[in-house]
Amino acid sequence: MRNFTLLALVSLFLLSSCATIFSGTRDEILFTSEPSGVKITMDGYPVGKTPIMLDVRRNLGGRWVTFELDGYESQYVKLETDFNAVSILNLTCLICWGVDLATGAVTRYSLPSLFVEMEPELPVTNKKPE
């Protein structure tokens, strides 16, 4: 029984991943805009309208967010990520690094909120210069 307990503890240590456990794989981000009611699309999928608090899954390359509203120019913003220092606790375990990389837990989003000021579309003229 003692050997089983020791084996279970060692297995748990080797198969755990510190950043995934301690800081999770998602970040809450508040999206706001002027004017409000702007449609938000993340990585090509509609996720709501501003103002909205979203629980955004982490991703190694960041995520692209599109803000769209009729009569305004579309805005494109990349959610940048920073290194999650908690993952340093994995220095002794390559498997743990693999889990944290696969879940995106080695990163975190840099901003807790994102504000976008929409710019009105410019009128299109069909007049040829003289």
Image: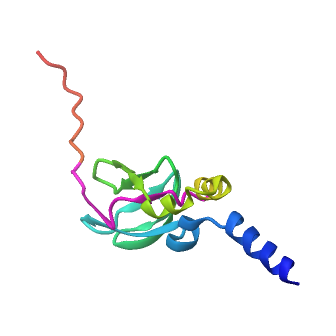
Q: Position of residue 123 (x, y in %)?
A: 21, 41
Q: Position of residue 52 (x, y in %)?
A: 38, 73
Q: Quarter of the image for the N terminus: give it.
A: bottom right
Tell me, yes or no, whether the highlighted magenta stretch contains residue 112.
Answer: yes
Q: Position of residue 113 (x, y in %)?
A: 31, 66
Along the viewing direction, whichever of 19 and 25 lies nearer the viewer: 19
Instruction: Tell me which corner region of the image, top left, top right, bottom left or bottom right, holds residue 2.
Output: bottom right
Identify the residue shown where x is 63% and y is 54%: 102
Identify the residue shown where x is 60% and y is 57%: 92
Identify the residue shown where x is 24% and y is 36%: 124
Q: Residue furthest front?
A: 2
Along the viewing direction, whichever of 81 and 97 lies nearer the viewer: 97
Residue 55 left/right relative to 121: right
Along the viewing direction, whichever of 1 and 91 lies nearer the viewer: 1
Residue 102 left/right relative to 6: left
Instruction: Point out the stretch of residues depicted in magenta.
Output: 103-120
Q: Residue furthest left?
A: 130
Residue 44 left/right relative to 10: left
* In the depicted structure, whether residue 2 falls above or below residue 11: below
Q: Position of residue 4 (x, y in %)?
A: 86, 78
Instruction: Tell me which corner region of the image, top left, top right, bottom left or bottom right, holds residue 39.
Output: bottom left
Tell me, yes or no, whether the highlighted magenta stretch contains residue 110.
Answer: yes
Q: Residue furthest bottom?
A: 1
